[in-house]
Image (cartoon, rainbow, N blue to C red):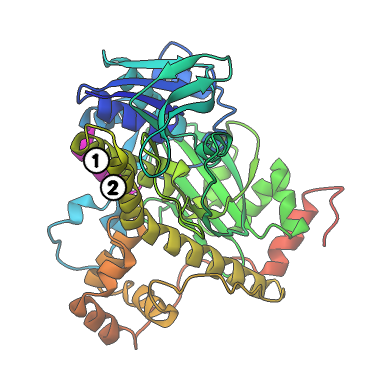
Amino acid sequence: MASIVIAGGGTAGLALALALGGRGHRVRVLERSAPPPDGPVVKSAELWERPSVPQAGHDHILNALGVRVLRSHAPAVLDAALAEGARLADLTAAAPPGPAEPGDEELVTLLVRRAVLDLVLHRAVEALPGVALSHRTAVAGVLTAPSGPTGLRVTGVVTEGGGRIPADLVVDASGRRSASRSWLAAAGVPAAGDLTGPSRLHAFGRFYRLHDSSGPPPGPLNRGNAAGGVWDHYSAVLHPADNEVFAITFGALPGDRAMAALRTPAAFTAACRLSPYLADWVDEGVASPLGPVRAIAMPPNILRGAGPGRQRPVAGLVRAGDAACVTDPMFGRGLSLALMHAFRLADLIDEHPSVDEWLGLAATELADRVLRPWYEQGVHDSWSRAERWRAAAGAPPVPDPGRPAPPVPGPVREAASAAAATDRAVWRGTTRIGTGLAAPAEIFSDPEFLARVRAAAPHPRVPSGPRPPTYAELRQTVTAHAPGREEG
């Protein structure tokens, strides 16, 4: 069995350690942040300080792909999360009428906070006899030795404290910064270019807890597992989580100074009261905030090492999770893709026990096959949403000549979205895409699916339900509740 060092103890690193440790490999996880506090999972998760994972303090979605991965590869982790107050939400509750089909049981999401899920994973990894977790330990570089066509192979890591840890395989699970780029550069191996596509979106989020857990929810979950909507000029979506906790997140353009006032509690609450489906949830008699409003700039979509000067893999080193591919968090794919990628990597490592260059080639092929489609979809989704919001704000379009062609032409995608309101089979297909269970090309290459889209397309759904505020109404409300902020 291989000796493996995983640099990073986030979701991807922990999931990979769980998979490899369970198969008998000797694994050491090196994480720069402090360990979680001892005690009950939910309380410890709320107290866990993780400066190296700042996004953990924001709303996350474990969509149907992530649930499928846990059911298949780590059912004890899923059971433990459910025992700690997480819940499975049945998305078919929001489907149009029609008969159920095999596979519909997969259309669920796990309602859970990122910190709770990560802590459940952490404790599952801690329980494995062949895995060691070292906190407050950061990797500064890699050990190398001459080998093969690349001229070297990675043989271990050097920590910031000067420790030298040999390993058959080093996994970069350092997250979005993908620290292996600097490790290789320091070792004299030029880093390959990345494929990138900007997000150009900002988010403002806040967690709340319901006062009464015994009654019905304050308002309908009109999106199946969520409430609110993605409108022509902003988004306002509520996601329930574990233990009567829920999160509300607003999406806005980064250059809009009026919308930037959403970081103030009064403006955030006023926007909730104005947005469809959210007002009843933020009533003071119904729920209380659990902390401040947190702002975050959405990171760009990135596919590591797949750009100009694509690099031949270096033996003894692979990337996992966000270190391999980042997708715009606004679309809720990253957590599930990290879990899926981690368990697929574990399969590859079992298939290549010698940990030679062939493992690196297989890992590169895996990323190209299972992550590239979601990178490309993320680039398109980020661009199209930002352009729609810019048009509503009266801003000129931003040309993006480097943007890849959309996986599915816009008019076809729009027709399918309209048809999904009345045709359950079309709804099923578009929902499988939205939850990561199927790539767009897989669904839209099905002749029967396209035939149903064409048949339903002339009868789009007439918009119903409460009307969102206009762009002017929203800006006026937000600025009115944020004294001292200039509208612009």
Classify mark 1: residues with Cα within 10 Å, few (<14), some (14-19) or many (20+).
Answer: some
Residue sitting at 60 percent across and 28 percent down?
51
Q: Position of residue 311 (x, y in %)?
A: 45, 51
In the image, residue 378 above or below residue 146 = below
Q: Where is residue 349 in the image (x, y as percent from the top left)?
A: 25, 35
Was residue 451 drawn as part of the magenta stretch in this picture? Answer: no
Q: Where is residue 454 in the image (x, y as percent from the top left)?
A: 28, 85
Asked if labels 1 and 2 touch by Cβ distance under 8 angstroms, the answer is yes
Residue sitting at 49 percent across and 28 percent down?
142
Q: Name the residue under label 2.
A: 362
Q: In this view, does 436 lie to the left or right of 273?
A: left
Q: Is residue 384 left or right of residue 133?
A: right
In the image, residue 65 above or below residue 182 = below
Camera-nearest residue between 250 and 181: 181
Q: Which structural element holds mark 1? A: helix
Q: Where is residue 391 in the image (x, y as percent from the top left)?
A: 65, 75
Quadrant containing the C terminus in the rendered view: bottom right
Q: Which amino acid does label 2 sit on?
A: Ala
Q: Name the residue under label 1.
A: 348
In the image, residue 271 above or below residue 29 = below
Q: Which mark sits nearer the N-terminus, 2 or 1? A: 1
The quadrant holding residue 17 is top left
Residue 286 visible somewhere in the drawing: no
Quadrant containing the N terminus in the rendered view: top left
Q: Give the range drawn in magenta.
A: 62-74
Q: In this view, does 180 lie to the left or right of 51?
A: left
Classify mark 2: residues with Cα within 10 Å, few (<14), some (14-19) or many (20+).
Answer: some
Residue sitting at 62 percent across and 31 percent down?
291
The quadrant holding residue 4 is top left
Q: In this view, does 317 lie to the left or right of 350?
A: right
Q: Which disc, if any, is residue 258?
A: none
